[in-house]
Image (cartoon, coloured by chain):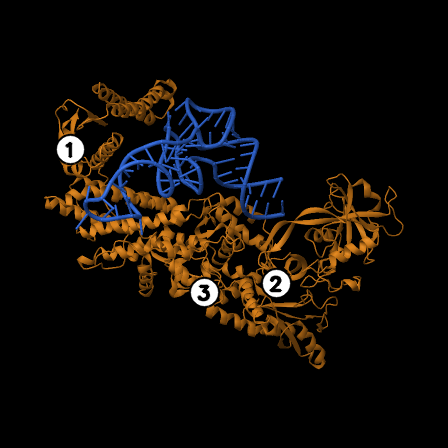
Amino acid sequence: MTLDKNFDPAAIEQRWYAHWEQSGQFRPERGNAEPFTIVNPPPNVTGSLHIGHALDNTLQDIVIRHERLKGKDALWVVGMDHAGIATQMVVERQMNERQQKRTDFTREEFVEKVWEWKEESGGTITGQLRRLGCSMDWSNERFTMDEGMNEAVLKVFVDLYNDGLIYRDKRLVNWDPALKTAISDLEVETTDTKGSFWHFKYPLADGVTLDNGQDYIEVATTRPETMLADMAVAVHPSDERYQSVIGKEIEQPITGRRFRIVADEHADPELGSGAVKITPGHDFNDFEVGKRAGFAAGEMLNMLDGEANVCQSADGLVPDEFIGLHRFKKDGVSGARELVVQRMKELGCLIPHVSKNKDGETQEHDAEPRTIATPFGDRGGVVIEPWLTDQWYVDAEALAQPAIKAVRDGSIEIVPKTWEKTWFNWMENIQPWCVSRQLWWGHRIPAWFGFELHGDNRLSIHIPDNDELRNVGSTNDDKVFVSESESNMIDAAKEFYQREIVVVADRTAAVAYTLDNPEKMATHAPVWQDSDVLDTWFSSALWPFGTLGWPEETKDLKRHYPNDLLISGFDILFFWDARMAMQGIQFMKDVPWKRLYLHGLVRAEDGSKMSKSKGNVVDPLGLIDQYGADALRFFMAAMESQGRDIKMDDKRVEGYRNFATKLWNASRFCEVNGIGASKTLRAPEAKLPVNRWIISEVTETLATLDKALGDLRFDAAANTIYHFTWDRFCDWYLELIKPVLQGDDADAAEETRAVAGWVLDQIIVMLHPFMPFITEELWHSMASETGGRNYDLIVAKWPEPKAEIDADAKAEVDWLIRLISATRTAKVELNIAPGTKMTAHVRDGDDALRARIARQTSALDRVGRLESFSFDPAPEGATAQIVIDGATYVLPLAGAIDIDAEKARLGKALEGVSKEAKSLEGRLGNANFVEKAKPEAVEKARADLADKSAEAERLQAALARLG
RNA sequence: GGGCGUAUAGCUCAGUGGUAGAGCACUUCGUUGACAUCGAAGGGGUCGGGAGUUCAACUCUCUCUACGCCCA
């Protein structure tokens, strides 16, 4: 088989990928080998491959392929995330297009439809990861909602509940009115928006006045609509202006509600009037103030339903005209906010904002313009409403302690280390994690409710009397049964109630059941399951052990937990990584992974963040089409330096495509010169300096590469193999061996073919983690003449040259390269055609140099165009002179030559060398340097000075000879 | 307000306590069979400003400036 002139990635990528996968080589049987494990961050089942995935997965694939080549039992766990909110949104959007909505279906029907969608079009991304060349263990592909993960989720929930680490609580949550679910703090994105700051008069009740006689308190707010649920006004306890009215009452003008003025440090005397209205049911700060003022969470007034429309509050004081209005203007329709402002204005309770326009005229406005830090839901995209509901919380603070300790004591190493502080800072200030979501797609919470029992053994049927629209899945007065299965739950409920258990759909059904069947109340008790599902991240937090079979004590679990490494973008450090650490330590009593590598974001060419709305998203598949997966992968690796984002750069991807072509062509050269696959893992025996040199170079390159990969320096690793391949192997080695291959010395040619074949093999193996496709192709094509390989490159052996660094050979080839380079430079500067053959007259050459020249005659001739060497003085006439180490090479020039050009050339070289010599001299002349510097540094300076001085002398002499 | 990061060649980025490197771009030359997706040679940087530590600072410390990110 002869290689085509150009490398065409598309022609081989799919073929090799299919072959690897079908032959099961992503996870070869290596039961006795040392395990190495990575779990892939499960992509959303709705997702498709974006450039960030390309980076993340390339890095993981480099690591896993490297470890596999090193003979380890390398396991890269793969799977998908059910992505609760995201997936439900996708399916609901499709329904909307067909004029349907979720609530047209029963919950079971809807969930069934999501599964259907998942089977049909979910997992696009898995095919795309294959195109990137990722060598995951697809044979055990997992899903966060598969049977095994379900079991793990149930057990974790129940165990945490039983340990008091999951509890139900009524408090303010971040409520997303678009999605109608609670979300966690992390899912809230705070953005500065332009808003207004309104100032109002709150009349003092009972004829009370301030010290200055004013009969109202001024309050200012950015959210006037919450006025409908105000329960207090707060002033700072030390604020002189309000001392006399603390404890007195306000009569709210719109609702007529009376409430107290309370002293609380939350009120900032510097801000506005220093008095603030307090709405404990709809503001996080006010909630705390409300609690301090003595209100229990259950007493706090609520005035909004799940879609953030106004509903009646428990005290019935919200005027009818507000009921049903949206909280604020939506789709051009005025809401409660606008009406409240209007009514307050009509009541004379709006204090206008006065400003001056450009012309200096005063103007009145209803409100003062203001920038407001506004919370948005990261999925729904609408303003979050703090809402008082019952939700399930994980005691994150308790779980965080061991995770903090693990990083402190080094059980988990975070790379780059700078992220440790972020880890500690977040973990040390962690808040309870709200894990319940009011969705249908996800792990249903394994909790059932029933009515509490009275002392007289009667069911206590508490019916919430305020608003039907609120979450009435349960009330704080209900009894909770948390259990891994319904049957276990029934047993527990029977035990508790001493009655038959009737499972009904929800609380409403349970109430109906008791009302409809009064005769059964002594013998039957209804229970209903919590309708909520768990936060998606609750299940993905179990990924490092759930995917290995936990809670079963499987062989995989024993071998592959803890995982060795986790690679993730820093954007999911809190969402995922931190929670894996918490759950992993809690349930496995050991860290989930020994190292955590955090990489940055891939940004657009101009440095901006890629986003669909900006239209600057780069499609990795397009880049693969254009340049090949290998080139894209190499780009990702080469650009991945620790602690920095990557800016997209197509030209650079193109450069790595060129690199692949370069390697391809070097292989073609080898092929036509009878250089084939190596037969040995260790370096072949070699006599020729050029061969001994390249073997040493391989050994050094390998050491550098292993070090870089060990340190997770992907850029250094990529650059190392790149420069060895192109600069050392292609530019010098292959050029230097051409005369040997075509020469008369059959033994030398034989040795060289063996060495060249071995070196190319080492390159192919070392490059394989970065560029798996082209290397696998070359691995096989290089051996096609000799009967093929015994195994595929993907499972080949990582280099073990077992060769010493040959200092003599290195010195000799280094000299050769410098002499040839200097000759070329001189030719260009003197305007001599590069192909011109020349004779060199050597001055000050010793026997060792004569021997070197004798050994390198053919290379000097063919590559350096120095066809002969003489140790006699050069004939009279124009010459070019080159100084290398201790010798001067005098090149007689035929015909007329520009003496001035040669003088200038030598003069420039002399200037450079003299400057360096002078600097070294200065340093050595400094007594402080000689006394205090490290002896090696002094030694080196002395040696360098000797070299430079000698070179300067020779250049001086050369100049003198020109006259 | 708290925390973190970044400022090095025209651009994108490495880098080390002993006077700076890569890729791309640029200039000149070059097709003798591996490769023009190439080869050869070259130009280009007072390493953001200031101060300090040190025999020696691009590298360590402090500070200022600019930009970015996270948290509140």
Please identify the residue farthest to the front as the structure is shown.
A896
Q: Quadrant of residue A559?
A: bottom left
The x, y position of residue A172, in whole percent, is 67, 57
Q: CA distance from mark 2 to mark 3?
A: 24 Å
Same subunit, labels 2 and 1: the answer reads yes
Chain ID, mark 2? A
User: What crowding class fits label 2: few (fewer than 14 Cα within 10 Å), some (14-19), or many (20 or more)?
Assistant: many
The x, y position of residue A707, in whole percent, is 34, 44
Choose between A693 and A517: the one closer to the eye. Answer: A693
Question: Residue A463, relative to residue B3: is it above or below?
Answer: below
* Lower sequence index among marks 3 and 1: 3
Q: Which residue is mark 2?
A: A179
Q: Is residue A374 visible?
A: yes
* Colour of chain B in the rendered structure image: blue
Q: CA distance from mark 3 to mark 1?
A: 64 Å
* Lower sequence index among marks 2 and 1: 2
Q: Which residue is mark 3?
A: A123
Q: Which residue is mark 1?
A: A853
Same subunit, labels 3 and 1: the answer reads yes
* Lower sequence index among marks 2 and 3: 3
Query: Mark 1: which amino acid?
Result: Ile
Chain represented in orange: A
User: What crowding class fits label 3: few (fewer than 14 Cα within 10 Å), some (14-19), or many (20 or more)?
Assistant: some
Q: Is residue A77 visible?
A: no
Query: Mark 2: which amino acid?
Result: Leu
Q: Which quadrant of the rendered structure holds the N terminus of chain A?
A: bottom left
Q: Quadrant of residue B13?
A: top left
Question: Residue A732, relative to residue A228: is it above or below?
Answer: above
Tag on residue A29? none
Give the residue displayed 18% in from the left and 57% down from the top. A785
